[in-house]
Amino acid sequence: MSERVDTIQFSGQAGVIDCALDWPAGEPRGWALLLHPHPLHGGARNNKVVTTLSRSATQHGLLAVRPDFRGVGKSAGEFDSSRGETADMLALIEQFPSHFPQWNAGPAMLAGFSFGTAVAAQVYASLQDAQAPLPSAFVLAGTAVNRFRFQDVSPPADTLLVHGETDDVVPLSEGMDFAREHQLPMVVLPDAGHFFHGKLIQLRELVSRHLVALGT
């Protein structure tokens, strides 16, 4: 998947946040934070959609950070319906420069899949509220933000929304409701289910083209 995979731990409100680090081939020019689906339904950082997002990031020269949410793998705590998970990701972003001082402006890319979209959207909103540096690339796949939203969110106009036409976990209509609410275009992959089986290469190429277009 990448030239090298390491692990690193940060400290959240519930304890350890255990993460995988996927390194690009050359010297990284920034980092990406990639968030996984629902922990109580088997979601973890090695989910194939998340690792596909990681491939796009590393091929673009970014160090990809894939945390396990609370209660998954070696990460401490219990599922907290996106509230605690959002706080943990903000703590990770705050602590990141102490490990990698060359990147003190936050992630260049923030992305989530399914439940991870809710956490990503609320992390983005919290960074906006704090007037902190914002990711230049914001990617949501299988958007389920409204299921776990506890604060207002205002995604940027260049957000990349991707949804499967035949998603039976988060119906396309639900993704469209979010897109309509925020007046965002959405890319719909024909015949794709929630986990984008058989469509992961398309997803990777979509994200890669988005990163190139943004100059991330």
Image: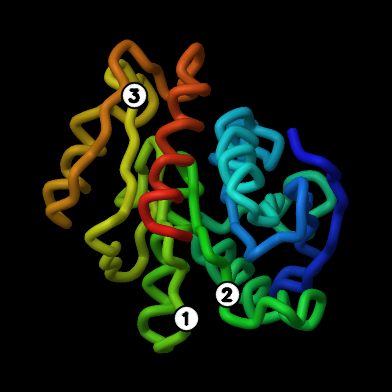
- Give left or right: position of 10 versus 139: right
Picture quarter containing residue 181?
Answer: bottom left
Residue that label 2 marks: 106
Label 3 SS: strand
- On-image quarter of the N terminus: top right
Q: Say how many tags the image has.
A: 3
Q: Which of disc 1 and disc 2 is earlier in sequence?
A: 2
Vertical order, 24 against 156 (above or below) = above
Q: Amino acid at mark 3?
A: Gly
Q: Are marks 2 and 1 in contact (CB under 8 Å)?
A: yes
Mark 2 vs mark 3: which is more N-terminal? 2
Local secondary structure at mark 2: loop
* Residue at x-position 37% and y-position 16%: 192
Q: Secondary structure at mark 1?
A: loop
Closest to the observer: 168 or 165?
165
Q: Amino acid at mark 2?
A: Gly
* Cα–Cα gap, marks 2 and 1: 6 Å
Q: Which of the labelled discs sits on residue 164, or is there none?
A: 3
Q: What amino acid is labelled 1 in the image?
A: Pro
User: Distance of mark 2 from mark 3, alpha carbons?
Assistant: 29 Å
Residue nearer the viewer, 141 or 57: 57
